[in-house]
Image (tube, rainbow, N blue to C red):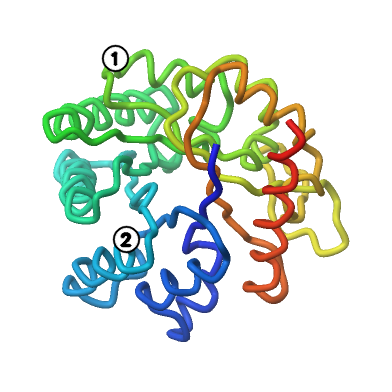
Amino acid sequence: MEVGVSMWSFHRSAYSGRLEVPSFIRLAKQLNVSYVELLNVFWKSNDEINLAKKVSDENGLKISAYDIDNDLVQSSYEKRKEQIAKIKEGVNVALKLGAPVVRVFGGEIKEGIRREEATKMIVEGLREGADYAYEHGIKLALENHGELYGTGKQLAYIVTAVGSKALGLNFDMGNFLLSGDNAVDAVKIVGKYIYHVHLKDFKKDGEEAEFLSTNGEKYTCVGPGEGDTNFVEFLNELKKVNYNGVLSIENEKKGDELENTKEMVSKVKSYLLKI
């Protein structure tokens, strides 16, 4: 397993205009990681896509995943098709970047749409997106998030229902806590489907709690090894399912983004030496 950094670790800097994609890649080089993870929400122009590939190559970094912000739970067929088109465009961009994985979402519950209908929309949309990805040699990685696909059992159902070799998981270690699950237990259920991993953790009822779980509990984002997930046990479970991919740091802690990300990278590397 190798360590990478997601640009989401610097989302405040990016949204404020203080950090652009090429600058993030150069910054990641200073963090001494092998991989970067890029997101569609941070492009300033289409020209930046080719530049990002050039800069990553120049700095000896690989792009582990390209993340898009789709939502397949929509009230109309036309809107669902727009979201499927976004997945397909994500695949096209990933090909330009040399990224093997496109991180996707399923969708969020909407008023007037029953849970069963919403899950069906997710399955059908991901199936069409996965067919396109498979044709182009790209993998889609569904990230555990929210009420409809936030637990290991929910993820297993969706991946099995889609039934495509192109669809697996972007396994977010911390997000399981926000859905009333635990990453250690979830690996045992869906470990064989993991294509990419996000590393962050949460701690219940922290002094600066700002994340609300699906059952109404408040959490604070912390680094791996600092929260409510047993990080060593989690890494060992990944080893048991033969996961040899990227562990992408996704810093959402309050405070200085650079210093927090540096600390998380350092700690994760030290943990990897012990397992």
Task: Classify mark 1: helix, strand or loop.
Answer: loop
In the picture of the structure, the residue carrying the numbered disc 1 is 163
Q: Where the C terminus falls, by quadrant? A: top right
Judge left or right: residue 115 versus residue 241. left
Could you tell me residue 139's position as x and y percent? 29, 33
Task: Classify mark 2: helix, strand or loop.
Answer: helix
Judge left or right: residue 182 versus residue 86. right
Residue 110 seen by the camera: yes
Do the residues bearing badges 2 and 1 touch, measured as CB atoms within 8 Å? Answer: no
Tell which of 247 and 202 is nearer to you: 247
Amino acid found under the numbered disc labelled 2: Asn
Tell which of 261 and 46 is nearer to you: 261
Q: Residue at x 56, y 17 (%)?
A: 241
Which mark, by number, is residue 35? Answer: none
Q: Earlier in the sequence, mark 2 or mark 1?
A: 2
Q: Residue at x 44, y 21 (%)?
A: 193
Q: Is residue 156 above or below residue 225?
A: above
Quarter of image, res 126:
top left
Tally of marks: 2
Amino acid found under the numbered disc labelled 1: Gly
Q: Residue at x 36, y 53 (%)?
A: 63
Q: Please rate how many residues cluster around mark 1, counting C-alpha atoms within 10 Å: few if below 14, some from 14 to 19, many from 20.
A: some
Tell which of 203 and 147 is nearer to you: 203
Which mark, by number, is residue 40? Answer: 2
Q: Residue at x 64, y 35 (%)?
A: 176
Quarter of image, res 12:
bottom right
